[in-house]
Amino acid sequence: MREPICVLANDGAGRKAARQIRDLTAPLRDAGLRHEVRLIRHGALIAAEAQKARAEGFATVIAAGGDGTLCAVATELAGSGIAIGILPLGTFNFFARSLGLDTDPEAAMAQLLTGRERQVAAGEVNGKLFLNNASLGLYPALLERREAAYAKWGRSRLTAYWSGLRVLATYNRPSRMTLVVDGVEEVRHSPMVFIAQNAYQLEEYGMQEGVDLIRSGKLAVYIAPPLRRWQLLGFALRMAARMARPYRDFALLGASRVEIETRARRRTIARDGEREKMASPFCFRYLPDALTVIVPEAG
């Protein structure tokens, strides 16, 4: 692992998280590697800390957190040549798993110490990276409602389902969107567009057609049909049961660049589970070799 090393860790959980990070980074001290640990009190500050690490000349940055934390770090380090290490501390850790990293943080640190560097692709929307997926429409609204429900009632499958039903209950009509897919313009009406770039995540959900597109060097663009409210509930159930199929239940396109313009000037975009307002049009791009990451020696 190239030195010096900066470890960026979300300290939102307080003392317990600080102790965990101290224990996880002990192998760096034991190996005599020059490193610095920075505990970040608020997730919104992660991007700024990654910028700071880049400006200060760190050769390796280890992101300790989930996919959202890693996404913020990756956006700031893309194209810099700085190696990114991952300590998976999130719920799903799709990107870390796609690289062959162990989901146990201690085992992952051992893999980083003996690992090698590899160039990997990423997706981008309006200058911000995503490592798994990005979306607009109903899905960002669902994430927002679900997080609010979790904060009030706690995390559970029942809470997730209930928040989803409440989002569907407020759905009125599909949005008109103008898409330019690799230079070809078309108009569609849809409640949601979901754009994936992580083949591993799609494999987990049995979406092989999208996997094939990503492995060919393209984004997999899923467009939900213009359904009524009661039809949308059936569509959601088929998706949850993994019974929905492309070209029958939804449109699936492969593209290296997709531009989407909506009537609303600003819309909420979800990137790897994190939400933010962006201005239309939304330009999604597939970026080959965007990041330098550390993978297991055998990966």
Image (cartoon, grey):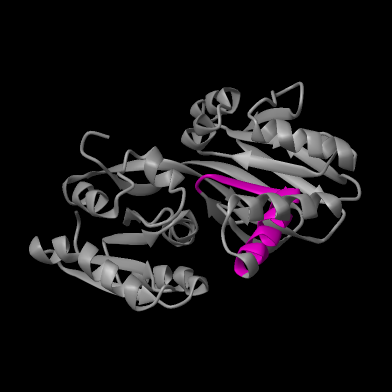
The answer to whether residue 264 is left or right of residue 221 is: right
Q: Nearer the viewer, residue 49 or 180?
A: 49
Q: Position of residue 14 (x, y in %)?
A: 39, 77
Query: Is 283 located above or below residue 286 in the figure?
Result: below
**Majority secondary structure of the magenta segment?**
helix
Is residue 14 shown left or right of residue 112?
right
In the rendering, at what x and y percent does residue 216 appear? Answer: 51, 25
Residue 143 location, quadrant: bottom right
> Considering depth in this image, is 19 or 132 the residue closer to the camera?
19
Residue 135 against residue 211 in the figure, above or below: below
Q: Is residue 48 left or right of residue 285?
A: left
Q: Residue at x 29, y 54 (%)?
A: 105
Residue at coordinates 69% horizontally, 23% vertically from top-left? 245
Indicate the quadrant containing the C terminus: top left, top right, bottom left or bottom right: top left
Q: Position of residue 69 (x, y in %)?
A: 45, 61
Q: Which residues are magenta?
A: 131-151
Asked whether residue 259 appears in the rendered view, the answer is yes
| 264 to the left or right of 127 | right
